[in-house]
Amino acid sequence: MESLIDDIYIIPVLLDRIDVPEQIKDIQYVDATEPTCKQRIAGALNFQLKRMGLVKIENNVDKEISWSKENFREVWDGIPGYEIDAEFVKLSSNEYNSVHEVGEFIRGYLLRLIFSYRAYKLQQDSNLFNLVQKKWSRTNTLAAYCQDPVITGRIISICYNIYAYGAGAAHPNSTIKCFNFHLNPLVPINDPDDIFLDPDEAFPVIQNIVRKNIRPLRLDGETVAVDAEDNGSQYQSEDWINSGTRDWDCYSIFTFLDGKIRFLFPPYQVGPYAEGPYYSDVPILDIKAIIKNDLLYALNMWY
């Protein structure tokens, strides 16, 4: 890629307070002794990353973890064709040396999705599609957008909003995919066996709390404010909720937030498609007795 005149490809840093030689006085540099040194370096990196099509680095100094998001796009016109938009997340840390593997793990998941869409090149069907049709109606579409990582104690959670449209379908579908990891040691938290002392005994407790607190989740990821006595949706039915929360398989999407575990449910699972995804928060203080000790320590809730 050709470099532009104002591209940033090197950032000079003055490590010690000295008289800068006349030959290089006109060169912009960052003084390492200044309090704003890190912010200036991050600002320069963000400028160039945006120009290269990358999202700016988000710094989380308190948690000692930084991350960036790399845009990926691939389009192929066919009968059917495909269109993919995805964000790869990259993480780094001086404290948690293995945290970059979280991004590699998620990248592998996204690549499997990408490979499945590329396979449409081998599944061309002129009986169902033709080039006269509108392009969008004969294009399989995938979009996977990364929410900002959430670090709770020594646990990191990263959720993706995933949208998919199958060529010829009546409407697109959406879901949420969450990845949760202990930071030290870096191991995934995949299912109830990783959270609860006895998942079978824990299930009716979790099920009861979740069913009482299910709420719609806005498209921007924000929760919907409701009154304490409101059931969260005028369109949900008790049968719909009960069916969508009947066993542990219904609780496969979850994330850790400050003081709670949030269970998420895609459209249709516990309510109508039009309302989008739903969520239910379970306060950890209410279920401490059934949570594994190592998880409580990692969440800084062992007290």
Image: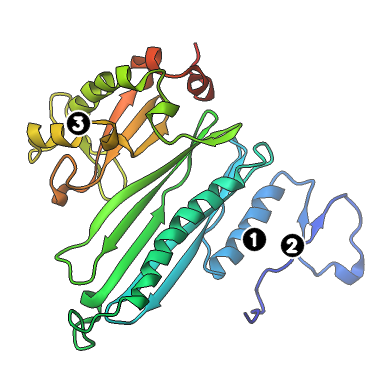
Q: Position of residue 79 (x, y in %)?
A: 27, 81
- Residue under the point 38% across and 15% down: 290
Q: Position of residue 209 (x, y in %)?
A: 24, 22
Please tell me how many numbered marks the rendered image carries: 3
Q: How far apart, in angstroms, are the residues tagged by discs 3 and 2?
A: 56 Å
Dot 3 and dot 1 residues touching (CB under 8 Å): no
The amino acid pointed to by label 3 is Arg
| Label 2 environment density (alpha carbons within 10 Å; few <14, some 14–19, many ≥20) | few
Residue named by callout 1 = 44
Find numbered disc 3 in the image and state the secondary structure of the residue it sits on. Answer: loop
Q: Nearer the viewer, residue 258 or 194?
A: 194
- Residue under the point 23% across and 87% down: 131
Q: Quadrant of residue 283?
A: top left
| Label 3 environment density (alpha carbons within 10 Å; few <14, some 14–19, many ≥20) | few
Find numbered disc 1 in the image and state the secondary structure of the residue it sits on. Answer: helix
Residue named by callout 2 = 11
Q: Nearer the viewer, residue 232 or 72?
A: 72
Residue named by callout 3 = 246
